[in-house]
């Protein structure tokens, strides 16, 4: 049976398990989906280089939507579309007051910069080998190569930063969370849904042909666009409220995405 569909999935707490790794069933399922003609895509807040390593572990040719939609790459790693933060906005965002315990990060086209080391953050990337570069002078730089600025820390410490960003820069920026402790700021209108729309247009496909999987607030626009929207059992409770029409599927630590695909497309 040939599968005429675009399958797009988030990574953390969606396609990856609690150890931030791929279940063998997930690898087997994605390879079978590709053999049957499905188009595959990975859409994540992670950096392109980080996602590319996961794609290699999957062993498939998948499009990559990285940095919450700031970049779209084709299956041969060619940049298809990109929308960066204005340099002046990067300058202003990196100068915001924050507690010393909150880490300032930026994702550039080439890598991940952070204002000080934080071993906690390396656990998410231990399976890919993608690591940050410490730049103590990160604050106040007007860089023109930044896809997102992110603040990582306790949610109670991020809340006032989020309020200030929305009050001062709401018309210039898109603000979201990929995890409760990761406040992420991209250029206006940058989100996974916009990038998915570009990909659908390139492929000549419609939202009715798209099955999408996500677990958190940075997946909202993508899941609103895809008619086959699926929310993980372990998702942020706010996502269930935002997307009451979406199908709730299994847990990410039990290969929920793979099991849904096998059932939906009769792979077993």
Image (cartoon, rainbow, N blue to C red):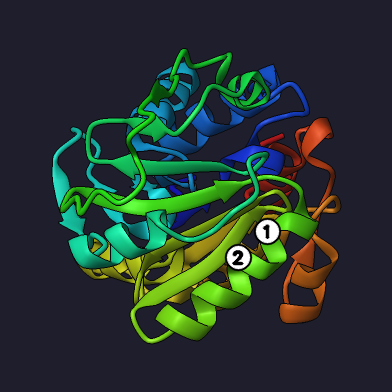
Check disc 2: other Cα within 10 Å, few if <14, some if 14-19, many if 20+.
some
Q: Residue at x 22, y 62 (%)?
A: 83
What residue did someone put label 1 on?
158
Dividing the image into 4 quarters, which one contains the C terminus?
Answer: top right
Q: Give 130 or 114, whichever is nearer the viewer.
A: 114
> In the image, is 61 to the left or to the right of 144?
right
Residue 55 quadrant: top left
* Residue 239, x across and y down, in percent: 75, 69
Say how many tags the image has. Answer: 2
Q: Residue at x 73, y 48 (%)?
A: 260
In 3D space, how far apart are the residues under numbered discs 1 and 2 (Cα atoms)?
Answer: 5 Å
User: Dot 1: what SS?
Assistant: helix
Q: Are marks 1 and 2 in contact (CB under 8 Å)?
A: yes
Residue 240 quadrant: bottom right
Q: Is residue 159 positioned above or below 125 on the image?
A: below
- Asked if residue 4 shows in the view, the reply is no
> In the image, is 70 to the left or to the right of 116?
left
* Residue 109, x across and y down, in percent: 23, 40
Check disc 1: other Cα within 10 Å, few if <14, some if 14-19, many if 20+.
some
User: Dot 2: what SS?
Assistant: helix
> In the image, is 194 to the left or to the right of 15?
left
Q: Give 87 or 233, whichever is nearer the viewer.
A: 87
- Asked if residue 171 shows in the view, the reply is yes
Q: Give 167 or 70, whichever is nearer the viewer.
A: 167
The mark found on residue 25 in the picture is: none
What residue did someone put label 2 on?
161
Q: Is residue 246 positioned above or below 35 on the image?
A: below
> In the image, is 202 to the left or to the right of 107?
left
* Residue 86, x across and y down, in percent: 21, 66
* Residue 20, x across and y down, in percent: 67, 25
Q: Residue at x 84, y 47 (%)?
A: 250
């Amino acid at each position: 049976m040939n599968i005429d569909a675009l399958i797009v999935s988030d990574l953390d707490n969606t396609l990856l398990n609690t150890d931030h790794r791929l279940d063998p069933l997930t690898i087997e399922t994605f390879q079978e989906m590709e053999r049957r003609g499905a188009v595959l895509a990975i859409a994540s807040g992670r950096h392109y280089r980080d996602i590319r390593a996961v794609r290699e572990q999957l062993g498939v040719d998948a499009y990559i939507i990285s940095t919450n939609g700031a970049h779209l790459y084709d299956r041969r790693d060619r940049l298809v579309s990109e929308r960066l933060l204005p340099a002046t906005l990067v300058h202003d965002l990196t100068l915001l007051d924050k507690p010393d315990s909150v880490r300032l990060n930026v994702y550039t086209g080439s890598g991940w910069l952070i204002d000080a080391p934080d071993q906690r953050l390396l656990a998410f990337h231990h399976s890919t080998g993608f690591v940050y570069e410490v730049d103590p002078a990160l604050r106040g730089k007007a860089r023109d190569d930044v896809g997102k600025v992110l603040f990582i820390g306790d949610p109670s410490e991020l809340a006032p930063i989020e309020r200030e960003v929305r009050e001062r820069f709401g018309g210039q920026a898109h603000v979201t969370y990929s995890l409760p402790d990761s406040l992420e700021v991209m250029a206006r209108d940058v989100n996974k849904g916009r990038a998915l729309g570009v990909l659908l247009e390139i492929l000549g496909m419609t939202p009715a042909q798209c099955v999408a999987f996500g677990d958190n607030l940075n997946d909202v626009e993508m899941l609103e666009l895809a008619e086959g929207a699926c929310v993980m059992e372990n998702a942020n409770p706010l996502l269930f409220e935002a997307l009451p029409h979406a199908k709730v599927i299994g847990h990410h630590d039990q290969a929920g995405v793979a099991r849904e695909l096998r059932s939906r497309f009769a792979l077993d």
